Amino acid sequence: MHYTLSFKDKIVAVTGASKGIGRSIAVGFGSLRAHVILISRTSELLEETATMVREVGGTASVISADLNQLDEIQKVVSEIKSTFKTLDVLVNNAGISKRKPSTEITEIEWDSILNTNLKSYFFMSSMVAEQIMIPQGYGKIVNTASIGGIVGITRSAPYSSSKGGVVMLTKVLGCEWAKHNIQVNAVAPAYIRTELIAKAIENKEFLETIENRTPARRLGEPEEVVGGVLYLASHLASYVTGQVLAIDGGLTAYGV
């Protein structure tokens, strides 16, 4: 086995690539010479990400789609198959959240979060596996879970439920598709400084509580999630499947 990390000539699809962790992941793959297919609802922001991918030496293409709709997922998979004939890596990263007391969550909010954070991951993975990865005999799928899917976090019932679902989905698909040489794994970031938590950390008391409970005594940055994704998507993780890698400054190890 060679230990140089490169994705030269590899085709990588990243959902939720318009900003935050997804954008950083896309740029990370680009820096290792991948062609990155950027998927999200906002084409203008995706074009910004594409420019960043190209600036670090990769190539990129953009697909604007609402992955909450199964017909949109099918269009994305069909476009990837017809254009590239293959897909080496799928990163399911699209995600939304809502911090509210559980007694105040509406059905619309619940459905929206679960559809984006879990349902889209399942059907994107399922269609990619069935139509591309199983026929070609290999593939890597990396899901963005969260420590919210591992430990209980108050005021986040839909989000944590969806991410707990991602954890178990990762384990099930990892076991089910191992015989096809498809490895399915996940990263579980803690509090990462992105738009997703920007409003919450405006509360100084909330921010200090997070920092005090985290052994690293700080929030993570989007770029710090990238290394785990690159590892799990690479040949170095060829015997790793159904696993969840916490990227959390020691938070879950501390038992909070």
Image (cartoon, rainbow, N blue to C red):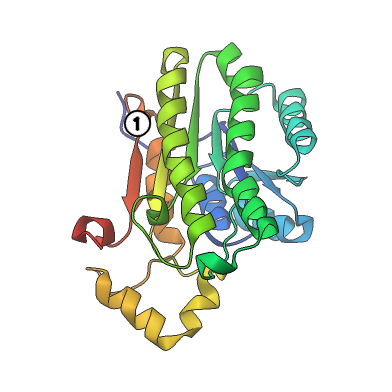
Kindly identify the residue that appears in the image at 75 percent across and 57 percent down: 42
Q: Quadrant of residue 55?
A: bottom right
On screen, 210 above or below 227? below
* Residue in the picture at 65% in, 59% down: 109
Question: 204 or 7: nearer the eye?
Answer: 204
Q: Which residue is at 38% across, 66% downward? A: 220
Quadrant in which the N terminus is drawn: top left
Going by the numbered disc 1, the residue's amino acid type is: Ala
Q: Position of residue 106 (x, y in %)?
A: 65, 62
Secondary structure beneath dot 1 equals helix
In the picture shown, does residue 256 fall above or below 92?
A: below
Does 63 sit left or right of 167 as displayed? right
**Quadrant (top left, top right, bottom left, bottom right) of the C terminus:** bottom left
Exactly how many numbered labels are in the figure? 1
Q: Is residue 196 visible?
A: no
Q: Is residue 122 above or below residue 164?
A: above
Identity of the residue furthest to the bottom in this view: 204
Q: Which is more toward the observer, 252 or 181?
A: 252
Q: Mark yes or no: residue 190 visible.
A: yes
Q: Tell me where residue 212 appears, x and y as whole percent.
A: 26, 77
Residue at horizontal 44%, vertical 60%?
223
The residue where tag 1 is placed is: 237
- Residue count near mark 1 (Cα–Cα under 10 Å), binned few <14, some 14–19, many ≥20: some
